[in-house]
Amino acid sequence: MMDILGNIGDGFAIAGTLTNILYAFLGCVLGTVIGVLPGVGPMATIAILMPMTMGSDPTTSLIMLAGVYYGAQYGGSTSAILINMPGEVSSAVTAIEGYQMARRGRAGAALATAAIGSFIAGTLATIAVAVLSPPLASMARSFASPEYFALMVLGLVMAIALANGAPLKALAMIVLGLLIGMIGQEDQTGRMRFTMGFNELADRTALFLPLVIGFFGLAEIYRNLEGPAGREALLRKVSNIWPSREDFRRMVAPILRGTGLGSLLGIIPGNGPVLASFASYSIEKRLSKHKHEFGNGAIEGVAGPEAANNAGAQTSFVPMLTLGIPPSPVMALMMGAMILNGILPGPRVIEENPGLFWGLIASMWIGNIILVILNLPLISLWVKLLTIPYRVLVPAILTFSCIGVYSVSSNAFHVFALAVFGLFGYAFMRLKCEPAPLLLGYVLAQPIENNLIRSLRVSRGDPMVFIERPISAVLLGIALVALIVILLPFIARKREKVFVEDDA
Amino acid sequence: MTRNRQDIAAGVLFIALGLLFAFDIWRTGLAIGEARAIGPAFLPAILAGILVALGIAVTVKAFLTRVEPEAKRPIPWRGIAFIAPLPILFGLTIDGAGLVLPIFVVAFLGSFATRDAKPVSSLLVAAGITVFSVVIFHYLAGLPQPLFGPWFDFLRS
Amino acid sequence: MMKRLFAAVAVAGMVIAAGGAAAQTYPNRPITMVVPFRAGGPTDTIGRTISEAMSRNLGQQVQVQIVDGAGGTLGAQRVAEAAPDGYTILLYHVGMATTPTLYPNLAYDPLTDFAEIGLVTNVAMTLVGRQRLPIATWDQLIQYMTTRLDRVTMAHAGIGSASHLCAMLFSQLTGLDITTVPFVGTAEAMLDLQADFVDFMCDQTTSTVAAIQNGQVNGYVVTSPVRLEQIAEVPTFQEVGLDGFELNVWHGLWAPAGTPPEVIARLNEALRAALTDPQVLRTFALFATFPVPLEDQTPEALHAKVASEIEHWRPMIEAAGEFVR
């Protein structure tokens, strides 16, 4: 324990130099500025800004890049809450309740909740990373294809709980998301599926950003354009920017639970942080005393997922730094940046480059402070953005989305997909089919299929491989129990004939 | 109380999309495979089947239940007409024209999705968005796309 | 009449002068280096490393643009169709020679639609196994594989990836029909290898050197003719007697066909300069790769390489089964 304290002390000595704080600040600001632009997700933000961070001392440039990463996530949550434009899956969960809060004139409270939740989660997760890195790293090593498959199945089950409306339609949306995730090049044989002859559609994960923007952002714009006013008069009173005492009381437990979930799932390579925010949402929905508010702006639905998201973002550094295995595309980018800076991530980074390792960890916390200092005062400014007339906001959202989508792969087809998904997203919105389950289905499609293929190839077609391995068996067991728990109330409630309040 | 038309439409849409995927599996002749090497059609075929089944379930359930009638909502044709084609326009021109022109055109036309857009103010808005985007993405972030692409090469000597 | 002729000559003269001036002043704006793989991957890393050094030599920024998808063919297609003015170039690897077989509907011809600039680097491959395998010698390895042929698995990083090619070559040379297990990228495969779920993998040193050094996996053989300094304990293919197991992930630089020869020459010069740059060498050494020998840093060598490699891989890929359609 003393070792760790000493190490963290050294880390702060490194991260706390004026230069490094300056670069962390710069990274946070740039990340926030680009990340808050609607339609530009963290992945695009980091890819865009990565070259800028090169050239200085490796530790400094990584600290800056990490700042960009946190800033981008913060920015992403901001646009998710304000205009229903999440830039990644985990902030899509924030958008569910956050945007509803904004529609009710509580944008400020939602943003403050997100900022506070992220800060607390970031602080605790930093400690978790420092204390638990070595043991956690070995935990990730007991996960192989069958375990990932089981974990993804568990994630899908949780997606049903996301739905605030009819579970049948939510289930159908998950399946549709899985099917959209099959579009592209199959990984075992290399055959193209559902690409209509266009190799441009080969990448199975690239439709993600168009899907998010289309189903959330564009659909919402179309909905707002229904009325004669051009936009619903939701912003007449942006009352009390700050959360009330009652709000604070309600956000504490969700934040702590979200932090725990996020820290744990973030370590697991392959969509850990994503699952964390989804899981946090469904847990808060079950535990909340204000169940009726879910779907209409429940503060727990912002606090929990945001905390989970941020904690996961932090701990997902662990597998990258300690195993040399990036758990997400964003971490792959960070790893590339490390190599360019002359550091090959792996178990020896801690020993050979303690300054970098502990400096980075200390800078995580510094980054979180910078962001909270930066963002809390900015909330009133962000909220003012809502008063921008729609004839300015709509073209701005459109252009930023096009640029953001295009910049990732320079692929025009992904921009085309934006148009198609926008129309589909609007159609589904009118039919009261929620987009979040579809999104999770899409994200999990490729890993679920590939882990199934691999498990069965290694076991020579024997499905017992999922039962014989203890972790996989436990996860599948939990999934089964969760499925029963989730579906039971729906079955029981049928008799009561509960009226699901519709708002959309 | 009235028929749940929303759910009927949703159910039919699910069925149609499920059949569409199923048709494409058949059209491209993807293999189902075997347990030790499941083919590219295995999971999609199952999923398409489930989607159709769920679509049928949603439709049937909708026919059996009645809901409160809802206020009719207009379809925002103007918004759709001025928004949906723009990403396609952007995608078709960005490689050739570079950043400036597609951004300007998309921003200009996009503002007409709203009813209160006027040509002059839209021009100003588009110019503002273009300058902002160029500063942020080109100068600040250093996006590799040129401001004016190969289509403008004839202007360069 | 005379006037008109005079005018025509004058215009022609100006055009020639302008052309000459353009070549002299090349490059006068930033150059885009298309990297046809994900940001952060090994090819992107190599691209960003050399582009920085080339920028210094050319006096103009060489910017990396990611155009990924379909095994790198989308990026290659982009460059094949770009204006042949030297402002769009491509960094690509052995995939240039394997994709013509893997993707029958390719929109370009790797040999005629590009003007080669030169080879960049050769990355050697390593056969690695999971940590707990009870194998110390090459003979034990072969014996292990032979006796458990129905259970042994070899991971690869995706259809047509270098590790896939290596697995195919290994099977062919040893006559052992080992079950391959597809992953998306090396990182995923490494996870299952370290979790003792799959047995072997053959991958680029860019991905394996650190893991071997750290004892996360065992290294059995390298495909380079000499042992690698960073993992000196791992024998070469010749030492273990697996003739023909020489396999390199070579990277090259291309421009669109029709690019003026003097522009190609200028780019080649910048490439050569980059390949002696100390910082480039340092980054390359991190994952045990080296610039190609001097005589291979030429357009001709790259052209010959692509031509011979296409034929080298075609029968092996076709024999391996159903692929992209």
Image: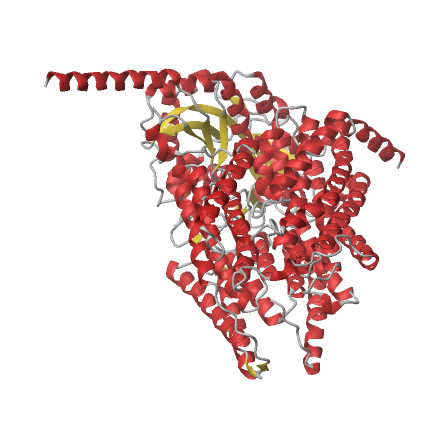
Q: How is the image coloured?
A: secondary structure
Left or right placement of residue A160 versus residue A397 in this view: right
Circle count: 0
Q: Which quadrant of the view contains residue B66?
A: bottom right
Quick check: can you spot residue C97?
A: no
Seen at 21% across and 16% down, the residue is C10
Seen at 63% across and 45% down, the residue is C192
Front-lying residue, B42 or A36:
A36
Quick check: can you spot residue B23?
A: yes
Front-lying residue, A104 or C201:
A104
Q: Position of residue A444 (x, y in %)?
A: 59, 55
Q: Is residue A53 above or below residue B70?
A: above
Q: Position of residue C208 (x, y in %)?
A: 61, 33
Which residue is situated farthest in the right direction here? A2
Left or right placement of residue B72 versus residue A482 in this view: left
Image quadrant holding the N terminus of chain C, namely top left
Front-lying residue, C216 or A139:
A139
Q: Position of residue C63 (x, y in %)?
A: 50, 29
Left or right placement of residue A382 versus residue C53 in this view: right
Q: Which quadrant of the view contains residue B149?
A: top left
Left or right placement of residue C172 versus residue A52 in this view: left
Q: Is residue C306 above or below residue A100?
A: above
Q: Is residue A8 above or below residue A443?
A: above
Q: Position of residue C122 (x, y in %)?
A: 50, 26
